[in-house]
Image: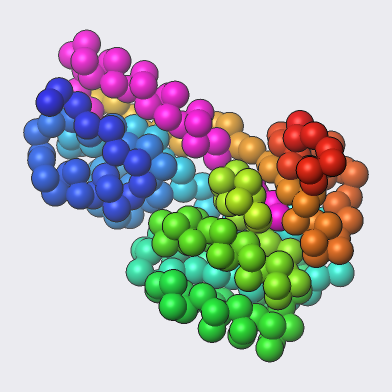
Amino acid sequence: MDVIVAAATQNVAAAKQATRTIPIVMTDAANPVGTGLVASLARPGGNVTGLSVLTPEMVGKQLELLKELVPGVSRVAVLWNPTRAEHLLLLREAAGAGRSLGLQLQLLEARGPDDLERAFSTMTRERAGALLVLRDGMFLLHQTRIAALAVKSRLPAMYEGKDEVENGGLVGFGPSLRDSFRRAATYVDKILKGAKPSDLPVEQPTKFELVINLKTAKALGLTIPPSLLQRADQVIRPPSGKAT
């Protein structure tokens, strides 16, 4: 083959392990420098280039939106996977953002699906007022279950992607994956025309999406501030309304 397109950090790493010569265009890859996929964003230096989705400051924005959504919140649970190296970077950023926002963070690990019930039980027991779910392949696989557990636990939850919100999550803010895949096509085009991956800088996200699920808000008994609704890129409404 002439080029491989791989989505998500683990899949890009698997492709790189399989070949050091075939060009690899990555999308949805978190912290490609920290995970060793590329030498640097400006000069990748190997056979991998493409789009990174890791913007640590985004976690601060997610916490800021959560506080706007639940003004009285003081304790926010953070669901993370300790097997993901990039989550440690995100947690450091979250700690600083939490302090500036006057939020106490409750860090809860989940390495596999069997850990989810325990994590939510701990959130309830320790009286978390909201939840931030870091992006993770296992969490995505069980996104419907996580959304249901959040509603059952009466926790307004923030996610990174619109998929989670379309499957029952309350609110999502993060890079547009659709935009990333479209931009990946330009890398493929350049490589097929003779460009070397090592010379093509890795791009950071430029388009972000705010998605809100009013059906989930209703189930939580939560009123979404009009200011948030006005800024949303997509609002998912109960069956009697329309999705914008």
Residue at figure coordinates x 36%, y 46% from the top left: 8
Quick check: 220 above or below 122? above
Specify the farthest residue to the front: 240
Colour convention: rainbow
Residue stretch rendered in magenta on the structure: 170-197
Which of these two is toward me, 4 or 34? Answer: 4
| Quadrant in the picture for residue 20 | top left
Q: Residue 124: horizontal and vertical position, in percent? A: 69, 83
Q: Residue 211: horizontal and vertical position, in percent? A: 69, 43
Residue at figure coordinates x 76%, y 31% from the top left: 244
Q: Is residue 154 visible?
A: yes
Q: Main secondary structure of the magenta part?
A: helix
Which of these two is toward me, 49 or 244? Answer: 244
| Quadrant in the picture for residue 104 | bottom right
| Quadrant in the picture for residue 170 | bottom right
* Left or right of 169 on screen, residue 101: right
Q: Is residue 130 visible?
A: no
Q: Residue 177: horizontal and vertical position, in percent? A: 49, 36
Image quadrant occupied by the N terminus: top left
